[in-house]
Image: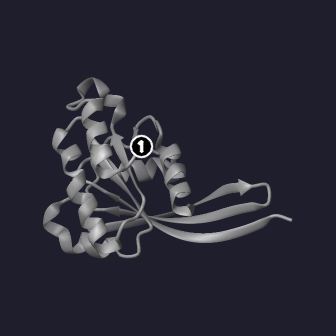
Amino acid sequence: MVNIREIKCKICLIGDWGVGKTSLIRKYVLDQFDDKYIVTFGTKVTKKRIKFKRDEENIIDMNLVIWDVMGQQEFRNIQTSAYRGSHAAFLVCDITRLQTLYSLDRWRNEIFEVTGEIPTIILVNKADLRDQAKFSIDNITAVSNKLQSQYFFTSARTGQNVENAFKVLGMKIIK
C-alpha cells in the first residue's frame, strides 16, 4: 500500500533587486520568460505542487508556497515579515553583477535572524550570460563554502537548472 503524505512548505527567494527572482519563479511555475524587468513591490506569493517518491511505499505531496521578496534594502521591515514561517530559501545573485554575490551573506543572515537556520541554496542566475560574468567559479565556491550552501547556475531564460534547484531544495526540506 502506498502512503501519501501531504506537506505545505514556504520557500523565499531573496537577493538584491534585478537578480531575476521573479523570472525564476515565473519559469518554474508557468514555464514562461519575459525580458522586461518586473519590479516586485512587497512580496508576491505563488504556489506549485510537486511530488517526491521516498521509496516504493512512501510519496511526499509537497505544496510549495513560493515567496518572491523584494530586493530593495530600504524595505527591510517588509522583507523581515515575509521571512516568518519559511522552511527554506534560495539566495539569488546575478552572474553579471559582482556585488549581488557578496550581498548573499547579508541576505542569509537576515532571514536566519527570523527563521533560525533553514536549508538554503545559492542560485547564480543569468547563466545564459556567462560571457558577461563578473565573478569566477572560485568566487562562487568561496561564498558557497562560507554560507555552507550548495549552488546552481540557473537561467530563467533557458530554464537551466531551475526545476532541478527546486527539487533539490524540496528534498532538503523533507530531510
What is the x, y in percent for residue 3? 77, 67
How many marks are shown on the rendered structure? 1
Q: Is residue 102 visible?
A: yes
Q: Quadrant of the C terminus?
A: bottom right
- For this view, does 16 lie left or right of residue 34? left
Which residue is at the front of the view, 7 or 146?
A: 146
Pointer 1 local density, CA inside 10 Å: few below 14, some 14–19, many at least 20: some
Residue at (24, 27) in percent of width and height = 132
Residue at screen point 25% across, 62% down:
109
Question: Where 141 sits versus 24, above or below?
Answer: above
Query: Mark 1: which secondary structure?
Result: loop
Callout 1 amino acid: Phe
Residue in front for this viewpoint, 149 or 60: 149
In the rendered image, residue 92, in percent from the top left (x then y), is placed at 32, 49
- Residue 128 x/y as whole percent: 36, 30
Q: With respect to residue 25, does 85 lie above or below? A: below
Which image quarter holds the N terminus? bottom right
Q: Which residue is mark 1?
A: 33
Rendered location of residue 112, percent (x, y): 30, 67
Horizontal side of 107 relative to 86 (left or right) equals left
